[in-house]
Image: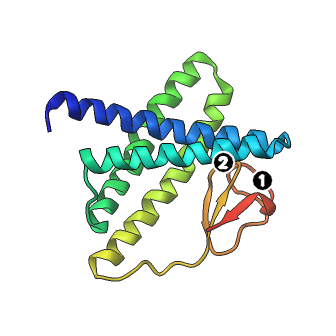
Amino acid sequence: MGPKTTENLKAAFAGESQAHMKYMIFADKAEKEGLRNIARLFSAVSFAERVHATAHHNVVFGVKPTAENLDSAVAGETYEVEKMYPEFRAAAEKEGEQGALTTIRFAIEAEKIHAKLYARAKEAAASGKDLPIGDIQICSVCGHTAEGGAPDRCPVCGATKEMFRKF
């Protein structure tokens, strides 16, 4: 593929990925406002944007075997914990942005756990096995990730057990 087409599809992947998430956020807001059909519209278009992002990704990057995808996931989560978010935190501290500092702290704590979970999954996949894991609980306030049952209170943000979503 030519360099300009590659660049364009990478940009399209990023844009479609952001649109997917933005529309999911908008759908949640519309749902909370009781606007169910508008929420449904945002959700439907969000799914379409995900389809577009997936297609662009597959053309530019392809889809590797799970073991390679896990390498990528570990590297990405580790980069976020060790480099990206610390740099973002330093800028937010310098600018006195308390809201940003909170969301960055939430993300760092979750990404640490994600990297460890992906590393465990990589070990399992390397031996040709699936990851032995039970329920995965995600705090809908901060993204804290827990195995098994949800804690009574989130150890990162203090949210109650009811704020966790089970996967």
* Image quarter of the C terminus: bottom right
Q: Which residue: 25% across, 30% down? A: 7
Q: Which residue: 67% across, 43% down? A: 41
Find disc 1 in the rendering and name its residue: 159
Given residues 44 and 103, the one toward you in this image is 44
Q: Where is residue 133 in the image (x, y as percent from the top left)?
A: 52, 78
**Residue 28 visible in the current orientation:** no
Q: Where is residue 59 in the image (x, y as percent from the top left)?
A: 26, 47
Amino acid found under the numbered disc labelled 2: Cys
Q: Residues within 10 Å of mark 1 (few under 14, many from 20)?
A: some
**Residue 84 visible in the current orientation:** yes
Amino acid found under the numbered disc labelled 1: Ala
Whether pointer 2 and pointer 1 mark residues with C-beta atoms closer than 8 Å, the reply is yes
Q: Is residue 29 left or right of residue 45?
A: right
Q: Determine which quarter of the picture holds residue 42.
A: top right
Q: Is residue 165 left or right of residue 69?
A: right
Q: Element type at marker 1?
A: loop
Q: Residues within 10 Å of mark 2 (few under 14, many from 20)?
A: many
Q: Where is residue 128 in the image (x, y as percent from the top left)?
A: 29, 82
Residue 58 against residue 100 in the figure, above or below: below
* Image quarter of the N terminus: top left
Find disc 2 in the rendering and name its residue: 142
Given residues 14 and 5, the one toward you in this image is 5
- Of labels 2 and 1, earlier in sequence is 2
Marker disc for residue 52: none
